[in-house]
Image (cartoon, rainbow, N blue to C red):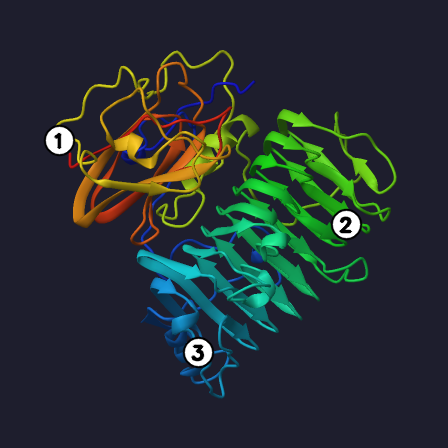
Amino acid sequence: MRRPVALRLQAALATAAVGIAVGMTLSTPQASAAAGTATGYATQNGGTTGGAGGQTVRASTGTAIHAALCGRASSSTPITIEVTGTINHGNTSKVSGSSCNTADGVIELKQISNVTIIGAGSGAIFDQLGIHIRDSSNIIIQNVTVRNVKKSGSPTSNGGDAIGMESTVRNVWVDHVTLEASGGESEGYDGLFDMKDNTQYVTLSYSILRNSGRGGLIGSSESDLSNGFITFHHNLYENIDSRTPLLRGGIAHIYNNHYVSLHESGINSRAGARAKVENNYFRNSKDVLGTFYTNERGYWQVSGNTFDNVTWSSAGSENYPAGPNPTSTTTVSIPYAYRLDGASCVPDVVRQTAGANTGLRVSDGSCSPQTPPPTTAAPTTAPPTTAPPPSGINLSLGAGADGSSKASGTSYGNVRDGDLSTYWSPAGSTGSISIKWGSATRVSRVVIREPSGTQGSIGSWQLVNHDTGAVLASGSGAGAITFSATALSKITFTITSSGGTPRVGEFETYAS
């Protein structure tokens, strides 16, 4: 069971994070060249500064990103590229120049250095288009969403990887990004975050990786052992089959991550790899740590992790799970300073900070479990059946509705009919439902109500501005959701985890 945590938020955050029980300090810098500094192994080998000190330009197409790279004085001239809007195949073409080596249908960071790519404004989405880093160094990628990159079917990009690194890559910091697919290899997708062929000194922090067969790998085969010195911290891995990550050789530091619904295996240390795995929270998952699908064993050092409803398979040929009582099989010395949040804090810390469009918020590592529990209860959201009625008119009445696949006998329109006895339910344990209007409509408050007798089935969720892809709010459980007033034509409530079959009786929207 999860234990209570210290509630030690800065005053500015406390007013915004209603219903969150977390003990940490968060900062909210604006998207800019100076948005934080690298952490983890990306601080080693001379550090990772990206385009700091160079020109800052804006780009709203992939071709414009390539043009910015090609317009530099040299391939190492520092540059920060602030990206807005949706980048896709239709607006991403090759650009030629002496300071770049680009290609159609992929954001190509090849044979270059000293570059920052950061989402600005209402966010940047790389739609079905991957980011490829090759023969490059000192690269920062922040505050972007990369989704549905395919290696087969149409269109294809970057070998099916959302972000892929290969061939002598050094010092990359990927931070506050959302990487997602819509299935596994059979649906045409590959890895979300892959490193191979001599890639070193990389940090992935405060990011979301979800809905994919493969989270990512370090090393493409048992003979590709030149990769390593990789840090993963404060990330959410959700609804992933395996590879969170797959580590072949090398060293990885994996701390303060939240793992939810890993279906086949999680951290897979193989071929002599060594992983330091500390203060992570694993929930509703299988075989979250070990050596899998090979007899080439890897090793791990474990401490402070929480295993919540984790199942373990029996050891056998090519299957060596670390559990059910994981113990260390090696030691790993970490060369940089870092602070650990308590594992019981991790789900809430990560929920507040991870992913694109979360304000680049970070934890200061001060969250620790409290015994006995704090005497002042954390604010909570009232159950949907007793939530006070919002002021104004329910804008959903008379609006349109659509969503992902629905369960038999349910209807999208049931969430906007004012009748709590009717409902929509996804075909599986996750899914999305949307309210839409014919023109931009101002919304600042949503109430999600579950039918009587089904309360508590909705787990984690995101509320998304469907027009831009921006995440308006995230959390868990039904109830009232408030956010900055936004004009939009479609708003989507995406259920990313659930206990049982989730049902939405009413999806109410209000201007205030």
Between tags 2 and 1, which lies in front?
A: 1
Residue drawn at (33%, 72%) of the image: 57
Query: What kind of residue is marked 2?
Result: Ala
Image coords of residue 158 (percent x, y): 57, 67
Identify the residue under disc 2: 273
Which part of the image, by quadrant, shows the C terminus? top left
Instruction: Give the labeled residue for mark 3.
Output: 93
Residue sitting at x 53%, y 59%: 162
The answer for how far apart the CA atoms under marks 2 and 1 are is 58 Å
Q: Secondary structure at mark 3?
A: loop
Residue 119, visible in the rendered structure: yes
Secondary structure at badge 1 equals loop
| Quadrant in which residue 291 is drawn | top right
Question: Please, what is the three-letter code of the amino acid marked with disc 3?
Answer: Ser
- Examine the rendering and report whether any part of residue 336 can be seen: no
Q: Which residue is mark 1?
A: 393
Mark 3, other Cα within 10 Å: few <14 / some 14–19 / many ≥20: many
Horizontal side of 272 relative to 436 (left or right) equals: right
For the residues labelled 2 and 3, the Cα–Cα distance comes to: 39 Å
Q: Does 41 sit above or below residue 318?
A: below
User: Quadrant of the image for the N terminus?
Assistant: top right
Residue at (44, 27) in percent of width and height: 502
| Residue depth check, mark 2 versus mark 3: number of the one nearer the observer | 3
